[in-house]
Structures are given as C-alpha cells and as structure tokens.
Image: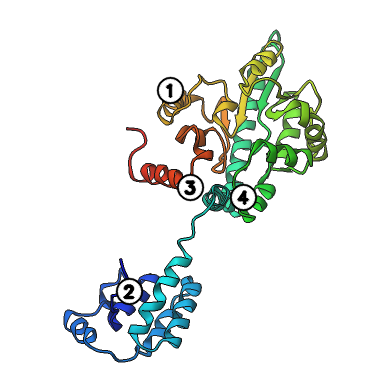
C-alpha cells in the first residue's frame, strides 16, 4: 500500500492498535458501521483510551511504546500517516543467511535449553534403553558373543547447546565444518541429563559401549576422548570411540563392531545414527521409518534434535546455502502444503 496519499481515521488507528495487541479477534471490541462512518469524517485528536488499550497487553510492549511515542508527537491522524512507513521499515530489513538461520533456530535452541519436556525425553530414552538392555542380558545364551550398544555422541550423550545458542545469539546460525572444528577442539561439550548415570549403569552390567560419531578423527580424536573422560563416561578409548575418517556413513563402523559383539541397541539423534537404508528425501526417509516402526523404542532409541541433522538437507540439499529469499519460499511451501504428498 502507498501510505503517502492515504488518511488514517481514528477508528482505523484503533484497529491497528487492537491488531497489534491481539484483541482483533474479539468482535465485541470492533466499532459499528455507524461509529466507523462518524469517526472517519472526524479530524479530532486521538482518543485518550489509546494508551489504556496498549497498556492492557504486555505482550507487545515494544510495539506499543513505538506507537505511543508517535501518538504523543503527532496529535492528528494526518501527521501520523507520515510516520507509519518508518515504523514498518524497521521490521523489513533483509537478513543475511547466518542471521536468518539463527532466527529460525532460536525457538528450537530455547526448547532444548529450557524445556522440562526435553529433559523428560532424555530420561525416557535412557530408561527405555536400560529396560531393553536388561531384557537382552536375561536372554543371553552362554555361547553368544558379548553384548554391546552403539551410540552417537552429539545430542545423544553430550550437549552442544551452550555453543550453538551463543552463536545464534550472535546472529550466526550457520554451523559450518570450520565452526564445528574450532568448537570441538575446546572439549567443552556437556553431558545430557541422565547420560553419565545411564552409561555407567550399562558399563556396570557388563555391556560394552561404542561411541560412533561423525566428529572428524584427524582433528577431533584427542579433544573428544578428553571431553568424554572429563564427563565421567566409561569405555572411552580409541578402540571404542570411533570417529569419522573417510566417510560419514557409519555402517562400516557398525559392521566392524558387529564382528566381535552382539549389538543389542543403537542410540542417536539422526537418521544416519542407525543401520537404515540410505534415504535422502522427506518421503523416502519417512517410508523407511514406517517400515521399521516396531524397532523404535526397542532396538533403536532416538533423541530429539530440532536444530540440525540430515532432516535439514532432506528439505533441500542446499538448504543451508540458499539465499534468504529462497529459504523463505521453501519454508512457506512446506508449512502450507502436505510434504508427504
């Protein structure tokens, strides 16, 4: 809309205020047709009720302060129309890709960082795993290979939320290989709620633990071993902490462990943490999950990770390098259509 040649009536301004304060859905507040016609032809100053309307809704304090500042300075609706475009432009500044990604990731990071429900899901995963492990121990035959579990590290037993959140707070949500390299080298990952107790319980039951992670071996091995030991995790050695060397496909490392152990459980936060067929699209991944539904909660234990993972590249192979406009288009398309059709 071109605001320059438009005149905003008192009632129209009040409607804007009501919309910003969340009251527009309440029909009893909206003016009648007669009131609208009367107010439209009036050039009287803004009604005094304006401030009380805004003060009644604390959810929009910032927007209210900006508009109240305008109404105090410009007593007539004619002058107000000249200022509204400036206010609108403040919210239409184009974001860079790192800024846009940080904005997208903020709610997910806050959920993992603050939600009691996230902690509950961690405990639930470990409790479910222990139950399955106890059953496997009871059913083990004397001539069978020793029991083992395979698990991922990041967002499965260790949390990187502090670093991810700090980066997002600094308007960078683009976690590149270089970013991960520098961060992992610091050895500052923290234990997920319940992780240390779970791992030590498994170790004390005589079940071997293998950490199969896609941290890059040449650069991250020593920092990872030191970090896991510092957290009090058991079975932390170069034979049982298997980092990525030439490929991110974990299946060869799974197979190597399976030569000497009976793997009774896989744990992770990402599709690739499990011995599943390769699938890269939204539909193909969902199809595999549906076909293996009886394994989830028994043989496979998955942790929630709404921040990063192969689910992002399933949306678009180049999702993280799209322009902000392209990413916004993809997001809106998936939000408004069924992705499984």
Q: In this rendering, which labeled residue sits more in front, label 3 or label 1?
A: 3
Mark 2 and mark 3 in contact (Cβ < 8 Å)?
A: no
Disc 2: which residue: 4
Using the numbered discs, state the Cα–Cα distance from disc 3 to disc 4 in whole angstroms: 13 Å
Mark identifier at residue 324: 3
Disc 1: which residue: 291
Residue lying at 60% horizontally and 27% vertically, measured from the top left = 273
Disc 4: which residue: 172
Mark identifier at residue 17: none
Residue situated in front as seen by the camera: 301 or 1: 1
Residue lying at 72% horizontally and 30% vertically, measured from the top left = 202
**SS class of the residue under badge 4?**
loop
Question: Which quadrant does the C terminus fall into?
Answer: top left
**SS class of the residue under badge 2?**
loop
Up-down: is 1 above or below 35?
above
Up-down: is 300 above or below 51?
above
Characterize the local packing of mark 1: few (<14), some (14-19) or many (20 or more) Cα atoms within 10 angstroms.
Answer: few
Mark 2 and mark 4 in contact (Cβ < 8 Å)?
A: no
Using the numbered discs, state the Cα–Cα distance from disc 4 to disc 2 in whole angstroms: 37 Å
**144 sits left or right of 280 in the view:** right
Q: Give the farthest residue toward the left.
A: 34
């Amino acid at each position: 809309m071109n605001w320059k040649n438009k005149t905003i009536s008192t009632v129209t301004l009040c409607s804007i205020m009501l919309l910003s304060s969340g009251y527009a859905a309440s029909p009893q507040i909206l003016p009648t047709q007669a009131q609208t016609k009367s107010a439209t032809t009036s050039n009287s100053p803004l009604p005094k009720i304006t401030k009380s309307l805004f003060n009644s809704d604390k959810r929009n304090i910032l927007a209210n302060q900006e508009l109240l500042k305008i109404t105090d300075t410009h007593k007539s609706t004619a002058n107000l129309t000249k200022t509204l475009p400036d206010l609108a432009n403040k919210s239409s500044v184009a974001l860079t890709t790192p800024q846009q990604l940080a904005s997208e990731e903020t709610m997910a990071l806050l959920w993992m960082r603050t939600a009691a429900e996230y902690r509950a899901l961690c405990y639930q995963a470990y409790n479910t795993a222990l139950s399955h492990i106890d059953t496997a121990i009871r059913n083990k035959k004397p001539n069978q290979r020793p029991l083992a579990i395979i698990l991922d590290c990041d967002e499965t037993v260790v949390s990187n939320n502090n670093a991810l959140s700090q980066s997002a707070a600094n308007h960078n949500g683009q976690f590149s290989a270089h970013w991960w390299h520098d961060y992992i080298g610091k050895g500052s990952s923290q234990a997920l709620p319940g992780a240390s107790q779970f791992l030590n319980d498994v170790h004390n039951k005589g079940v071997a633990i293998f950490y199969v992670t896609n941290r890059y071996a040449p650069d991250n091995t020593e920092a990872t071993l030191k970090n896991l030991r510092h957290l009090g995790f058991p079975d932390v050695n170069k034979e049982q902490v298997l980092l990525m060397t030439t490929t991110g496909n974990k299946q060869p490392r799974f197979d190597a462990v399976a030569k000497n152990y009976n793997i009774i459980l896989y744990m992770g936060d990402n599709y690739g943490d499990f011995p599943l067929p390769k699938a890269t699209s939204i539909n193909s991944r969902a199809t595999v999950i549906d076909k293996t539904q009886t394994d989830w909660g028994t043989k496979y234990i998955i942790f929630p990770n709404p921040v990063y993972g192969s689910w992002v590249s399933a949306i678009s192979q180049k999702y993280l390098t799209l322009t902000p406009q392209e990413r916004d288009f993809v997001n809106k398309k998936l939000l408004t259509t069924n992705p499984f059709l």
